[in-house]
Image: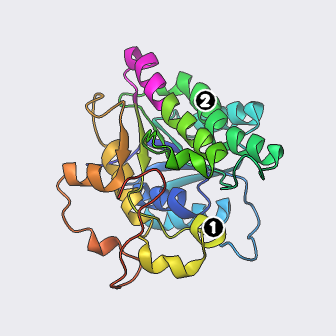
Amino acid sequence: MSLKGKTIFITGASRGIGREIALKAAQDGANIVIAAKTITEHPKLGGTIYSVAEEIEKKGGSALPIQLDVRDQIAVAAAMKQAADHFGGIDILINNAGAINLNGVESLDPNRFDLMYQVNTRAVMVCSQAALPYLKQSNNPHIISLSPPLNLKESWFAVHAPYTISKYGMSMLTIGMNQEFASYGISVNSLWPRTIIATAAIEFSLGGRELFSKARTPAIMADAAYAIMNSQNRALTGRLLIDEEILSEFGETDFEKYRVESSDDELMVDLFVDP
């Protein structure tokens, strides 16, 4: 498997899972577009589009950092054109950018819901639509969105229905675009972790660094995305995939290597995934 020469447009790639996917692909000599908002380092959060670009180059890939707010459809279209002009096309779109707020309907500021819906659901449509003319020209195009399986148990709505709606919207777009884009030969899938992943979202939104002993590293998501991106001719498409499950299909058996630290703590299952 190799992504050498492929151009991959990754939203929200200045840190976390997006960054990890970028570095994994860079090892093959892929062209990576780092499309994110961060151009100056946050006091609590490492990483900018420029620091990740440097890391990509050191790994053997080619990088194009673009400051981008995925809520701005005009800017998204311009970024896609800039990427295609720079690298000669776009082969893969990874909708990684996300917003999270786990308040329920009673306490959530409607403006926060608007933000989540725009960054999660709407951005998948906007970015996919803008990338489509270029993906049609690729010989093995992919769209991957970081969104969960559609688990309709009441428990996933009872506490944080607004966030659930915004993430499930992404997954529903995966199902729809898989059918809509079938004639173009585009593989469309979603990817979600079985366990929590040690990212800023866990540290600052879901409980703090103490949860890292129950988490896996972003490497498991990068390896899963790598397997998906290397699948050919829509052999893998229209699925709401879990990282561990898809890696098992590709022969991986050692999942202990993905733990953040050696610990007897039981791994914490992520949102929308049954234990």
The span shown in magenta is: 174-187
Relative to 82, say whether 263 is above or below: below
Give the residue drawn at x 44%, y 57%: 26
Above/below status of 106 relative to 175:
below
* Res. 126 image quadrant: top right
Asked if one can make out residue 27 in the rendered structure from this viewpoint, the answer is: no
Dots 2, 1 in contact, CB < 8 A: no
Task: Compare residues 235 and 134 and report the one nearer the observer.
Answer: 235
Observer able to see residue 198: yes
| Amino acid type of the residue tagged 1 in the rendering | Ser
Q: Nearer the viewer, residue 32 or 35?
A: 35
Percent coordinates x, y for residue 14 in the rendering: 62, 60
Label drawn at residue 51: 1
Residue 204 lies left or right of residue 254; in this view the side is right
In the rendering, at what x and y percent does residue 57 appear?
A: 51, 62
The Cα atoms of the two marked residues, 2 and 1, are separated by 28 Å
| Count of number-bearing discs | 2
Residue type, numbered disc 2: Met
The prevailing secondary structure element of the residues shown in magenta is helix
Which residue is denoted by mark 2 in the rendering? 125
Q: Residue 17: x percent and y percent?
A: 50, 59
